[in-house]
Amino acid sequence: MDISSTKDKIVKAAYDCFSEKGYNATTTKEIAKTAGVSEVTLFRYFSTKSDIFKEMLKRYSFLPVLYKIKIESDGIDLQDTLKLIAVKFYNTLLERKQFVRIMLSEINHYSEEIIDIYSNFREELDSMLISIFESKICDLKLKNFDLKVASMGFIGMIYSFFLTNEIFLKKKVDDIELNNVINAFVDIFLNGIKK
């Protein structure tokens, strides 16, 4: 079996196990079994369960989608890029709803190491958004503001809408409502950053 496919199987198995049982309740033995490899093989690729978690976040979070958007949005204005980011972020959350739900349920029980991994992931997400903003705002007259705060605010609006509807209210948002809300969020965001 080649290296990348074994590693891929382990990371996918980890995502599946974490989505079902949560990070804390999942063992490396369960991940290995789900991946169809021995635990010894798992440890050839990853030293710890937290290393698997870190790799899983890189592959199964919004980051890979955001990297693609950055490349594909060349020539698209900021407003349309923000709409694209918002739709793709919401849909990624929707696809990962069970994972989000279980992660939220055990958040108070995470070790400092897992909190640090998530914090670093969030920093990377903000950096990518800032990079996208910087590439798109050169022609706009902007207020003096912190791009990191803008990044957190923009992502926060979509995340909050997802949590409220899909997690807490268990309400399915249709495409029309989602597009109306995203258009409103983008308008609010752009009006907030322009002079």
Image (spheres, rainbow, N blue to C red):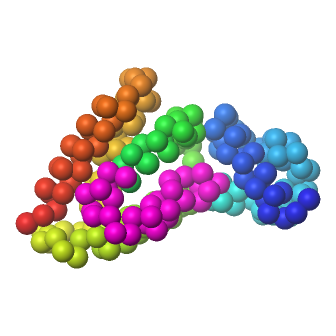
Q: Residue 112's quadrant in the figure?
A: bottom right
Determine whether, in the image, residue 105 is placed left or right of residue 183: right
Relative to 154, residue 145 above or below = below
Q: Is residue 80 magenta?
A: yes
- Quarter of the image with the C terminus is bottom left
Determine whether, in the image, residue 184 is placed left or right of residue 29: left
Q: Residue at x 14, y 57 (%)?
A: 192
Query: As drawn, which residue projects farthest toward the front?
Result: 75
- State the predominant SS element of the stretch in magenta: helix
Q: Residue at x 71, y 40 (%)?
A: 17
Q: Residue at x 57, y 48 (%)?
A: 110
Q: Is residue 125 visible?
A: no
Residue 180 appears at what percent x and percent y? Answer: 25, 37
Q: Is residue 86 magenta?
A: no
Q: Residue 73's quadrant in the figure?
A: bottom left
Determine whether, in the image, residue 187 is placed left or right of residue 181: left
Relative to 116, residue 28 above or below = above
Determine whether, in the image, residue 171 is placed left or right of residue 183: right
- Quarter of the image with the N terminus is bottom right
Q: Residue 76's quadrant in the figure?
A: bottom left
Q: Is residue 146 visible?
A: yes
Residue 40 appears at what percent x and percent y? Answer: 91, 56
Relative to 92, residue 7 above or below = below
Residue segment shown in magenta = 56-84
Relative to 3, residue 184 above or below = above
Residue 27 appears at what percent x and percent y? Answer: 77, 44
Query: As drawn, which residue projects farthest toward the bottom?
Result: 138
Residue 158 appears at what percent x and percent y? Answer: 34, 44
Most foreground residue, 50 or 3: 3
Query: As drawn, which residue projects farthest toward the left?
Result: 195
Most foreground residue, 102 or 98: 98
Q: Residue at x 91, y 50 (%)?
A: 38
